[in-house]
Amino acid sequence: MMSSAIPVWLTKEECPQGVRDNSVVYAADSGFRVVLPETRQAERKNEDDEAEFRVIQTAARKLDQLGLAKVSLEGEGWTEARQWAFAKGFTDTRSTNEIVFSDDAQSSLKPLVDTYRWVRNLINLPSSEIYPESLCEKVIEKAQEVGGKAVSARMVVGPELVNEERFGIHTVGRASQHPPVLLELDFNPTGDEKAEVEYALIGKGITFDTGGYSIKGNEGMVAMKCDMGGAATVSGALILAMQQGLNKRVKLLLCCAENMIDGNAYKNGDIIYYKNGQSVEIVNTDAEGRLVLADGLIRAGELNAKYIIDAATLTGAAQVAVGTEYNALFSVDDSFANEALKIAERSHENLWRLPLNSWHQYNCPSPFADTANSKPMKGGGSGGASNAAGFLLRFAPNKGQGWLHFDLAGAYHGQANALYPAGATGLGVQTIARILTR
């Protein structure tokens, strides 16, 4: 009930005596006041708004850290965007907090909050609970809950992948006790089986990544339950778009495997021969995400999807380039990429485009195959994120026209910070959802 919620107001007044001048939130009137920054003539569009949103999200994190479990956003100034900024900060890793939004924003913000929490919880679950088949089953269950009869799905599991020539997914996942899976989920609100596929969404679903024989150190392996963040992100984007009235046919392709080690695991020097005729030498078994996404891109081409979007926690190089508050975007389709950047800005999600040219696909040469899957050095060497995108470009239909690649540098934080609790962030879900409904 409203009476059990602690009220939170916005203010532009100076902090009262006894409160530090640089505080972003303070206790007052049996509740709390969030201190908005002074508005100025911003040199960049939306800079004032973004500064406000960061302050609001930071204040919400502080209220979460105080142990508050339920708040109501009261008084004037709580625009929908400001309330969403508060919601992103006012959550703990287990997503138990509750917010009473203003009446006019409740209907739009509730599905947004619920979807983000579902995505975050999915990514935060341990690999003992989330493995390729269970991940796909949870996505199917949630999509059918939202989309009803418009949703159908099939899973290609284990040896069936070989029969259908999905050799990348099978190779990466064959050493695990949990078989690899390609999920093909069809959202078709038209009811016409011959309807054009407007979008193919492809997600990297590596439910745990040891690095394979190019094994990670302990520190690098601790958070590798999050390596299915791309699959969760595109699934959440589709589910959110469905709730927002998506009326186009979308195929969701999740490329799922555990990258484990046993006597049957793939090794450095092995060669994968893909269905589209490309051959790939393995020089780093820890560059596995691009190997499974290649199968998804091939399948998207078979479906004649008009637009293709893939998302993956693909490279540490992207994090080095843009940090953990941005996702990185790659595309050779300037028009589509520029539209995505504008949508991200309207969604208040940080997205930065990094270089990708046609020649990036030749940056990992192999004397034994058409390409190697990386360079045999730490992080794939200089330009590692662009070279990984260049590898994917080899498999993108139409020479990459109509294709976007999201390298999710900001998908997961190993420790809590001023803006987010520890774990998954959901960054990218709203941008991709808005692309689907543009």
Image (cartoon, rainbow, N blue to C red):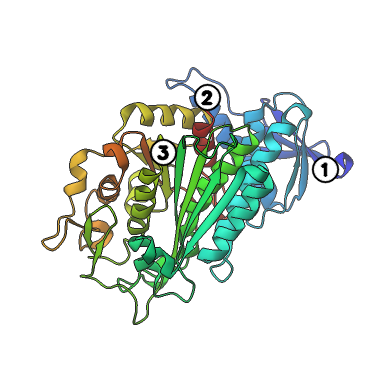
Question: Where in the figure is residue 405, as x and y percent of width and height?
Answer: 37, 43
What residue is shown with label 1? 5
Amino acid type of the residue tagged 3 in the rendering: Ala
Question: Where in the figure is residue 129, as x and y percent of width and height?
Answer: 59, 68
The quadrant in which residue 277 appears is bottom left
Q: Describe the element under mark 1 as helix, strand or loop.
A: loop
Q: Quadrant of the N terminus?
A: top right
Task: Return the mark for residue 397.
Answer: none
Q: CA distance from mark 1 to mark 3?
A: 47 Å
Q: CA distance from mark 3 to mark 2?
A: 39 Å
What residue is shown with label 2? 48
Q: Describe the element under mark 2 as helix, strand or loop.
A: helix
Amino acid type of the residue tagged 2 in the rendering: Asp
Query: From where the camera sits, is residue 7 visible?
Result: yes
Contact? badges 3 and 2 (CB < 8 Å) = no
Q: Closest to the observer: 73 or 189? A: 189
The residue lying at 18 percent from left, 54 percent from top is 364
Where is 267 relative to 299, above or below?
A: below
The residue lying at 81 percent from left, 42 percent from top is 6
Work out whether mark 1 precedes mark 3 in sequence or the reverse, and give the earlier one.
1
